[in-house]
Image: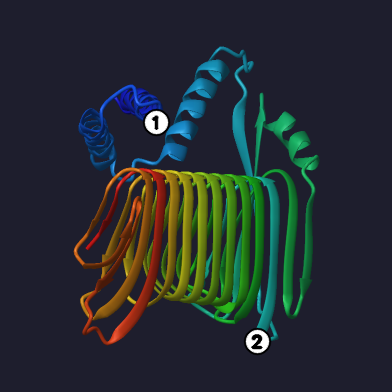
Amino acid sequence: MREKDKIKSDIITKMLGDLERLYKNKEISEESYNELKSKYEKELEKIDEYYDFADLGDMIREKVERSLEKSLGKIDWYARNEFVKEDILKGKFESKDVEIDFRVENGRIELKKSDNDEYNVLIRKRVKARNRKDAEEEFEDIDVTIDLEEDRLSIHATDTVDIIAALPEKNYRIRAESENGVINISDLKGEETILRTENGKLVMKSLEFEKIDGKTENGRIDIGNIKTEDLKLFTENGSLVLDEIEADQIKAETENGHISCNCDANRQELKTERGSIRVNVSKGENIVSTEMGSIKIKVSENTKAEIEARVGMGRIKCQGRTIEEGGRYKKYIMNEEGTKEARIKAETDMGAIKIM
């Protein structure tokens, strides 16, 4: 059903383009142009409203995964099974400032807070083999390099390895990388955390770092209950969900996906090429833009907001007072008696903007 409506959306978009050309060439009247344009834009808005945050990047990834499953199902795996070998690393950090560096080629990385003052790291190797003997030979080919010091833990692994770490309360600098795998980090504090994965989801919950930097090529980014000075997020194909974030500045960008943002920030920049954006604004400077998709902005009641909105093809709705208007550009002011102040710039090439 999603794919049918995606096709419908593409058709309507093309019809809008054709309509613009007809109007510019004076082949239809202004009355017919406005009537048809309004009709097409309402149809696009219905599709966007129905799917809400059904992410385009997730749709692309789901389609690829289904195709891979069908292809792999036809391959003769000679009855190979998955075998697992686990090692446990335990100990204590002698320093209050600790550096963590985990890197794997194919595997999950998970970091969370431990219940005591020790670290407990599970290193799980996974291989496909006909039997246990062959599996042991496969395990020998997996390189796992461990560098352990009083203030540093580094684990670098090849092939398919998962790293699941419970870490004591310290001041951390964290770097975690996986080529193909999910990275999940929660309940930790420190100076900086840098997360990188090519094909996988990034999940961050209950963190307090000065700087947080997360990037994935194909995957959703989901973060919540975060305190930071500088938050930077990027995904090529996937949605961005930011909830209960306190930050000085936020920059979140996706090429194919939707953005949902509930943040308290002095400056936030939210950008997607193809997808809708929903954001709650309470203060500061806010730049919200998409090339193809709707934008919905909710301004808190005690926030005085100056708003600039521009659409290429679409409508602008705002509950504030209009103070300037020119073509596809409008300027508003909301909650003039508000105790906090915000500046908002919202822009979409094709889609509706709604501010309330």
- Measured from the top left, where is residue 139 in percent x and y? 74, 40
Asked if 27 appears above or below 207 in the picture, the reply is: above
Most foreground residue, 318 or 141: 318
Q: Quadrant of residue 135?
A: top right
Q: Quadrant of residue 217?
A: top right
Q: Measuring 73% from the left and 29% from the top, which residue is drawn there?
A: 134
Most foreground residue, 269 or 79: 269
Q: Quadrant of residue 338?
A: bottom left
Residue 210 visible (yes or no): yes
Q: Label for residue 273?
A: none
> Which residue is the site of mark 1?
24
Furthest toward the front, the residue is 26
> Spatial distance from mark 2 to mark 1, Cα to Cα?
67 Å
- Quadrant the N terminus occupies: top left
- Quadrant the C terminus occupies: bottom left
> Which residue is the site of mark 2?
96
Q: Mark 2 and mark 1 in contact? Answer it, CB < 8 Å.
A: no
Q: Earlier in the sequence, mark 2 or mark 1?
A: 1
- Measured from the top left, where is residue 107 in percent x and y? 62, 46
Q: Amino acid at mark 2?
A: Lys
Q: In what element is the residue under mark 2?
A: loop
Q: Measuring 75% from the left and 55% from the top, which residue is drawn there?
A: 156
Q: Amino acid at mark 1?
A: Lys
